Amino acid sequence: MSEKATISRRQFVASAISVAAASSLATRRAFAEVTGDEKATPQAAAILTDGPGWKDQGIENLAKSPHAKLRDVPVRAVTITGGFWAQRREINVTRSIPTMRDLLEANGRMNNFLRLTGKSTAAQSGPVYSDSDVYKWTEAVGFVLQSGDHPELRASADKIIYEVVAVQEPNGYLNTYYQDDRKSLRMLPQTQTTGHELYNIGHMLQGAIAFYRATGDHRLLDAGIGFVNDFLIPNYGPAPKKPIVSGHPEIEMGLIELYRITGDKGQLDLAGYILGGDKRIELPERRTIYMFSGTPFTARIKMEGHAVRAMYACCGATDYYMETGDATYLQTLNTLWNDMTNTKMYVTGGVGSRSDGEAFGDAYELPNFRAYGESCAAIGSMMWNWRMLAITGEAKFTDVIERALYNGINSGMSLDGTLYCYRNPLAFDPSTGDKIRNTWYDTTCCPPNLERTFGSLPGYFYSTSADGIYVHLYDNSELNWRLENGVGLEVTQKTNYPWDGNVEITVTPAETSDFTFYLRVPGWADHADVKVNARAVSGAKPGEYLPIQRRWSPGDVIELAIEVVPQVIEANPRVADDTGRIAIQRGPLIYCLAGC
């Protein structure tokens, strides 16, 4: 996100946009069956496809994705009841998200919207991607509301959504940086490569969808559909439409997730066209490397360029594979994953070693003091590995998720929830006066990204499959959901993970049922002992899921026992900066050693 826009910052001329016109237009388009007062309870009309309903969709809606092996469970279906993550998530709700809202307002993010409706005289402030900060914050609130009722957060989000949709133009366009006097610059090829218009709308779609799944409120979703269906699809894409390029990948994920809940194939096709690259926009190779877009995704053979862009592009490409089954995408994704995890990933799960361009370096270029390891990049890796896990059901992807979550992501927010890391180096000298954690960055992509990740965390604990259920992460928690055959299922975890490796899992189907419980054995384990109802189960292998197929009865108990001891980790000898150095790992945690 470091790239600076080259566009002059002339002051907007304030203009009033009709809220009613933009809102009602989008509502008629997206929800033709809705009639009457728009303030009426939206839940009754908020199902766009024939299933699942808005409450039953997970982090992603994979219910009908033909090439996904695993299906997400809703965030609301899992309650984290204590242990390692409960306090982290509580601070996220009570401190991080509310204070970030205040910081967004204090730093002009909302004034950028208010000035366009005549409610603020402040000049436009912040970078070209400033709108996305608001959308990621809204997404964080959406995920939190999926876990429970928080009236103050809901009221804050309602107010912000009202102010956002008020500036949408009748043609569907919505971007505070390119309205009024910058209107002539919008969606020009150069603007697309640097202006983050599509990046912003991608985050808007994700925020809108998260809020919709929490509340059934579709106002922001209507605005997103308006941008896509009224402005983007009619005007941009294959000839004779205007060319399109994703300067910062993000729109691809948003379009495909939108397609999953609308069934509008035009949205999927546009995402595929963007992933394929538009030859009409000629860009130097160094630019397409940096953007990780602009050329066919399937032609890529290594991780390079801006790390967050690369991770988001891979997320979008994985989503595209899950819907289309295009084998060239899967081959490319596996090639890129192997390149990243074998040669370009830190022991913390962080990615992106170079501060110059916030980029991947060469193979084994993993410096410690100079490590960048942007929080957003680690989050992007977690998101991508979650998608690869959905395709395959392979635990190697979960191992990367866990490594990034406990280390490269968790380090990004202070324990009190008010200080954030943009970069996460593996070595640091405080005598320089530099501060790693700060309350605010003018490029504030990482703080709300961390907040939405902690808000969505319950949705990463389990997946269902045609033959049963997978458990991915361990902490004190309760699942109340159902198998894909419709049988209700409750799963309760009791554990002190990650401080020790003993996990007691109580499995309670609504009725005695045959299915497979896929128990994850972390890759860091030397070995694992597994019992069901006190009887030993063989076959547990580190770095794999143990399939326990049996006839399950209410109250059956699985016991997982892993010895958690300090482990010495040595880097690949080709990592020059780690010559003569080791890392200490205990369970999934990588330890930081402070000098005296």
Image (spheres, rainbow, N blue to C red):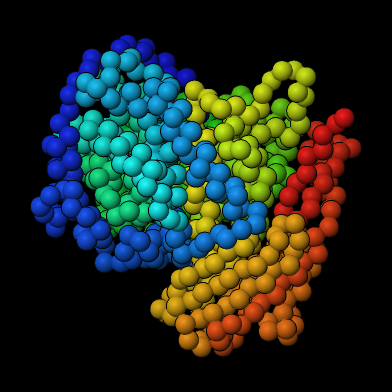
Residue 274's image quarter?
A: top left
The residue lying at 69 percent from left, 20 percent from top is 434
Residue situated furthest right in the rendering? 580
Relative vertical location of residue 382 with respect to residue 95 in this rendering, above or below: below
- Percent across and percent down for residue 136 are 43, 39
Relative vertical location of residue 335 with respect to residue 132 in this rendering, above or below: below
Task: Compare residues 363 and 476 and report the one nearer the observer.
Answer: 476
Residue 499 visible? The answer is yes
- Is residue 225 left or right of 438 when viewed as pictured? left
The C terminus: image quadrant: top right
Relative vertical location of residue 429 with respect to residue 506 in this rendering, above or below: above
- Percent across and percent down for residue 310 are 53, 39
Task: Compare residues 111 and 194 and report the one nearer the observer.
Answer: 111
- Percent across and percent down for residue 96 are 52, 38
- Percent across and percent down for residue 540 are 72, 73
- Is residue 58 left or right of 112 when viewed as pictured? right
The residue lying at 47 percent from left, 82 percent from top is 510
The residue lying at 44 percent from left, 80 percent from top is 487
Residue 233's image quarter?
A: top left
- Is residue 280 left or right of 23 when viewed as pictured? right
Residue 544's image quarter?
A: bottom right
Task: Give the mark count.
Answer: 0
Residue 127 visible? The answer is no
Task: Compare residues 227 and 220 and report the one nearer the observer.
Answer: 220
The residue lying at 79 percent from left, 53 percent from top is 586
